[in-house]
Amino acid sequence: MPRKFVDYITPDTNSNLHAILEVSNLLGFSQIWLGREWDAKPFDLNTLSSTHSLDLINRLDIDSSKIPKEKIVQILRRERRNFPIISVRCVDAEIAGWAAQDNRIDILSFPPHQIGKLFTRSIAKLMIKFVKYLEISLSELYLSPERVQIPTFRHIQQALEIAQLKSVPIIINSGTSIQSSLRSPWELASLSQILLSTKETPLESISTIPTQLLSRNQVKMSNDYIAPGIFKEPEIYIQEEE
């Protein structure tokens, strides 16, 4: 069975979303996660899907550098059932420790120049315990100024070493709003191979791991879902004989 590749993009008001999706399709992706902030206008997935032969998924991105923790909690309470994927960008140790334990959060990401400091072994342990995913958007590396690319590379590499040591699931993508900075799955995998210590993980992180997360959460969004392994029983109607 052919591998299905997943990418994550962050369209903004200046993005030509149709052009980005067309290129993503040509590059070999099957599924695209469309990231947006909590107060942004939602994407019309039906219209976009009818134009592009891609599986499109709405994803909520929360940047803790822009929103205080109290507001984030309110957003999570209101939006968890509306988004199959929720990510929090952690900019300090307190937020990282809290986000790693909150069951409404799926993915943790970090500023690339801080990830080596913020993604610690203790955070990794919490992420394993509460089933969280670490995300690395490689455009933050290859689009960064040359003078910071080497230290950024080292920070990301250090974090990925900890993630692999502790078995934290890793999601790798481009994470860009710029059409020209999109990369094919094989280019992302090639760059990831330099950062990672195993051969299998890069392709898994672009395909199997994100699709498994999505499948798990789509089950949770079902109206019949109560708790892990617990679902409402279907109601049975019996028509009485006259």
Image (cartoon, helix red, strand yellow):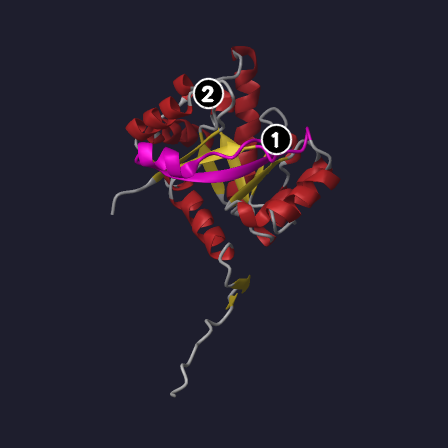
The answer to whether residue 79 of the structure is visible from this angle is: yes
User: Answer yes or no: do the residues labelled 1 and 2 have beta carbons within 8 Å?
Assistant: no
Dot 1, crowdedness within 10 Å: few (<14), some or many (≥20)?
Answer: many
Dot 2, crowdedness within 10 Å: few (<14), some or many (≥20)?
Answer: some
- Left or right for 108, reference 96: left
- Please report the bounds of the magenta region as a residue range: 37-66
Distance between mark 1 and mark 2 Cα atoms: 30 Å
Picture quadrant where residue 115 is located? top right
Amino acid at dot 1: Gly
Of residues 178 and 56, the one drawn nearer to the viewer in this rendering: 56
User: Farthest front residue?
Assistant: 242
Of residues 91 and 125, the one drawn nearer to the viewer in this rendering: 91
Seen at 44% across and 35% down, the residue is: 44
Q: Position of residue 128 (x, y in %)?
A: 57, 50
Seen at 40% across and 81% down, the residue is: 239
Which SS class for mark 2? loop
Which residue carries the number 2 mark? Answer: 15
- Left or right for 207, reference 40: left
Which SS class for mark 1? helix
Total residue callouts: 2
Seen at 39% across and 24% down, the residue is: 20
Magenta stretch: includes residue 56? yes
User: Farthest bottom residue?
Assistant: 242
Q: Position of residue 229 (x, y in %)?
A: 51, 66
Rendered image: mark on residue 116? 1
Quarter of the picture containing the C terminus is: bottom left
Q: Position of residue 166 (x, y in %)?
A: 55, 46
The answer to whether residue 100 of the structure is visible from this angle is: no
Magenta stretch: includes residue 202? no
